[in-house]
Image: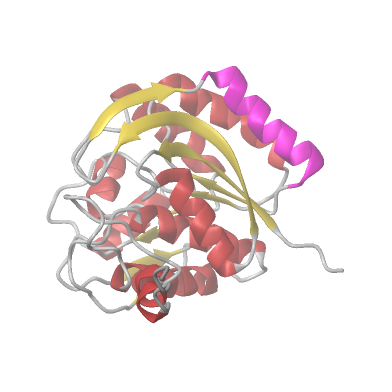
């Protein structure tokens, strides 16, 4: 029997199930890889806000990665919410255990509700120590501006070049915050646009997590960087289209499985006589 590739999500837990490791595991399953996790933080949140962010100890973060790598193996890594400087340091140390597995970094800075999820010192360490270890970094436009210190009038294409100048092999600057909704991929030779449709707003919570997790999963399956980025865009666009707009009072979660459509097709159980 063929071995199923394994992808580890090093990220925070979202109690509302829309983003973080919960979104990552759903994306992994949708694409057909086995998902493992190293939890970096526990949040108390829902669709309208984040109430608590509690960091997991560096020792525990490193141990989670090591235990998974030693027994199960790691074919790709997705890194999401880190939050604190000591967490970034721990993840840098933990990556020693994953060998040459490709590393996808989603530089999570602000929650959909507006909560700050990356401290200033953590951002500095992320730029100096973590981004140079990345195979591909997947910021949205505001995140790319912050990472690179770029002005607001810089083009999305130049943002992709500026992110790669920080050390990763490649960057995908996603276009959800622009009118055109085009992602731009850059790996040192030429900037490639990745197109996709725009869908109704209101069900995008977890879209960034889903995109980066999908990209990592496709890399684990053997796709090249551009191909993985293109297929990740497809999965994410579909998840936003199918998003669960009736869950919660705020931004609903994306849906990689088409749960609402499946629920509509499901026959109602007959009531007892």
Q: Residue at x 49, y 30 (%)?
A: 40
Q: Position of residue 235 (x, y in %)?
A: 44, 71
Q: Position of residue 123 (x, y in %)?
A: 35, 31
Q: Nearer the viewer, residue 264 or 249?
A: 264
Q: Position of residue 181 (x, y in %)?
A: 23, 71
Overall secondary structure of the magenta section: helix
Q: Quadrant of the C terminus?
A: bottom left
Q: Residue at x 48, y 45 (%)?
A: 21
Residue 190 shows in the view? no
Q: Nearer the viewer, residue 185 or 243?
A: 243
Q: Is residue 60 shown in magenta?
A: yes
The quadrant holding residue 225 is bottom right
Q: Is residue 95 shown in magenta?
A: no
The quadrant holding residue 157 is bottom left
Colouring style: secondary structure
Q: Residue furthest front?
A: 273
Q: Position of residue 11 (x, y in %)?
A: 48, 39
Q: Which residues are magenta?
A: 57-73
């Amino acid at each position: 029997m063929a071995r199923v590739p394994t992808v580890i999500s090093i990220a925070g837990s979202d109690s509302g199930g829309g983003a973080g490791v919960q979104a990552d595991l759903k994306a992994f399953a949708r694409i057909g890889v086995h998902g493992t996790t190293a939890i970096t933080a526990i949040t108390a949140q829902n669709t309208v806000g984040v109430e608590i962010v509690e960091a997991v100890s560096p020792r525990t973060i490193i141990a989670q990665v090591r235990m998974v790598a030693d027994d199960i193996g790691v074919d790709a890594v997705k890194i999401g919410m880190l939050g604190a400087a000591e967490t970034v340091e721990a993840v840098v140390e933990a990556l020693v255990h994953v060998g040459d597995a490709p590393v996808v970094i989603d530089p999570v800075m602000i929650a959909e509700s507006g909560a700050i999820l990356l401290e200033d010192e953590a951002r500095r360490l992320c730029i100096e120590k973590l981004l140079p270890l990345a195979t591909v970094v997947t910021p949205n436009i505001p995140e790319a501006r912050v990472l690179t210190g770029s002005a607001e009038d810089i083009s999305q294409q130049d943002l992709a070049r500026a992110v790669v100048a920080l050390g990763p092999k490649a960057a995908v600057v996603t276009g959800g915050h622009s009118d055109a909704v085009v992602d731009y991929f850059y790996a040192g030779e030429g900037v490639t646009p990745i197109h996709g449709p725009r869908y109704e707003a209101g069900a995008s919570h977890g879209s960034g997590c889903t995109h980066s997790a999908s990209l990592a999963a496709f890399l684990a399956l053997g796709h090249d960087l551009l191909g993985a980025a293109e297929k990740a865009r497809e999965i994410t666009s579909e998840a936003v289209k199918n998003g669960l707009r009736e869950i919660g009072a705020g931004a609903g979660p994306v849906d990689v499985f088409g749960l609402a459509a499946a629920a509509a097709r499901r026959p109602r159980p007959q009531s007892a006589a």
